[in-house]
Image (cartoon, grey):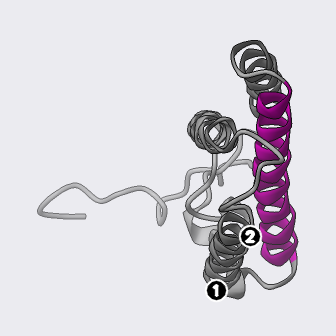
Amino acid sequence: MPTAVAGAIAVVLCTVLVGGKGLIGALLGSVIVLAFFSVTIVVISRVAQTKPEMLLGYAMLTYLGKIVFLAVLMVAFKHTTLFHFRSFGFTMLGLTLVWLAAETRAVLKTKIFYADPSAMPDSLKLKTAAQKRPESTAESEPTPLGGR
């Protein structure tokens, strides 16, 4: 959501400063950034649910795919006059920084267990008040030091 808001601000700002070509550049940059990061979220969340051991591999593949696709876009649009290239580039840079800041904040505010509480052995679990303590017997009482 913060990235979409920042994208709208960038579109308005580029339109006012540059004109129609700034609008197209900022709009295209916004769409690309939102699409790139949204695809990553979808792929990573699905892989995490089905094959968590493959998470790092898929994360690296999506990253590589985005870099290659972005390089192809940059080469394809190198000499274009369809839009203002700096509006396009600065919008993409700004929205990427906004996305990363928002994602970092979300991760820091999320409580993520580093150990699975349900996988704890019964011997280590705390006894609840509902469990009754055994009645005291001579065998269960500790013996004083040095004797019976």
- Residue 117 falls in image quadrant: bottom right
* Residue corresponding to mark 1: 57
How far is the residue under mark 1 from the one under mark 2?
28 Å
Q: Earlier in the sequence, mark 1 or mark 2?
A: 1
Image quarter where the C terminus lies is bottom left
Q: Residue at x 80, y 52 (%)?
A: 32
Mark carried by residue 44: none
Which amino acid, by three-letter code, is at mark 1?
Gly
> Quadrant of the rendered structure where residue 52 is?
bottom right
Task: Assess whether mark 2 and mark 1 are in contact (beta carbons under 8 angstroms).
Answer: no
Residue in view at x 48 percent, y 61 percent: 140
User: Magenta residues: mostly which secondary structure?
Assistant: helix
Vertical comparison of 75 with 1: above or below: below
Q: Residue at x 80, y 21 (%)?
A: 19
93 shown above or below 67: above
Name the quarter where the N terminus is drawn. top right
Mark 2: which secondary structure?
helix
Q: Where does the magenta region start and end?
A: 20-49
Task: Left or right? Give the position of 2 relative to 123.
Answer: right
* Residue under pointer 2: 76
Viewer-side label of 1, 2:
2
